[in-house]
Amino acid sequence: MQHWWDLTWLFTTAFALSAIAGMFRQLTLAKRRKAIDVGISGGYAGCTGLAISLVWHSYFIGNPTLLLGLCVSAALVGATSIDQVIVLVKKVIEVYETPKRHDE
């Protein structure tokens, strides 16, 4: 039987490791390195890791290390895919907003 402090440690560690991974990902891949962007990326990745650990902790009861690795990798993949979607939407908006020149 697991004690409440074991689960608290697991959820806290999943949030912290995922948040750190999200911040490192933002620092290494982003051209803009504003503190607010790094904080938001870390918070988003941390919440993703926490949500995954809350949902799947009963399946990985005997192997918390695997659960923590899954949380960190899912947080990184989720942050990367969301960033790619945002970049794609920005490019589409720029294409449709730029006026076309007709040089005659």
Image (cartoon, grey):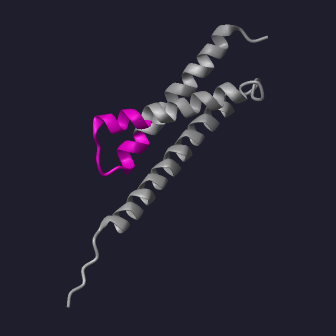
40 in the magenta segment = yes
As drawn, 29 above or below 5: below
Query: Measured from the top left, where is residue 19 in percent x and y?
Result: 47, 31
Query: Measured from the top left, where is residue 69 in percent x and y?
Result: 62, 36
Q: Residue furthest left?
A: 104
As drawn, 79 above or below 13: below
Task: Count up the numbered dots.
Answer: 0
Q: Which residues are magenta?
A: 24-41
Q: Nearer the viewer, residue 33 or 17?
A: 33
Q: Nearer the viewer, residue 89 or 58?
A: 89
Query: Measured from the top left, where is residue 6 in percent x and y?
Result: 66, 13
Give the main secondary structure of the magenta stretch.
Answer: helix
Q: Quadrant of residue 26?
A: top left
Q: Quadrant of residue 1?
A: top right
Q: Is residue 27 left or right of residue 82?
A: left
Which residue appears at 68% of the width and 33% of the height?
Answer: 66
Which residue appears at 61% of the width and 35% of the height?
Answer: 71
Which residue appears at 36% of the width and 37% of the height?
Answer: 38
Q: Nearer the viewer, residue 19 or 66?
A: 19
Which residue appears at 47% of the width and 55% of the height?
Answer: 84
Query: Measured from the top left, where is residue 68 in percent x and y?
Result: 62, 31
75 in the magenta segment = no
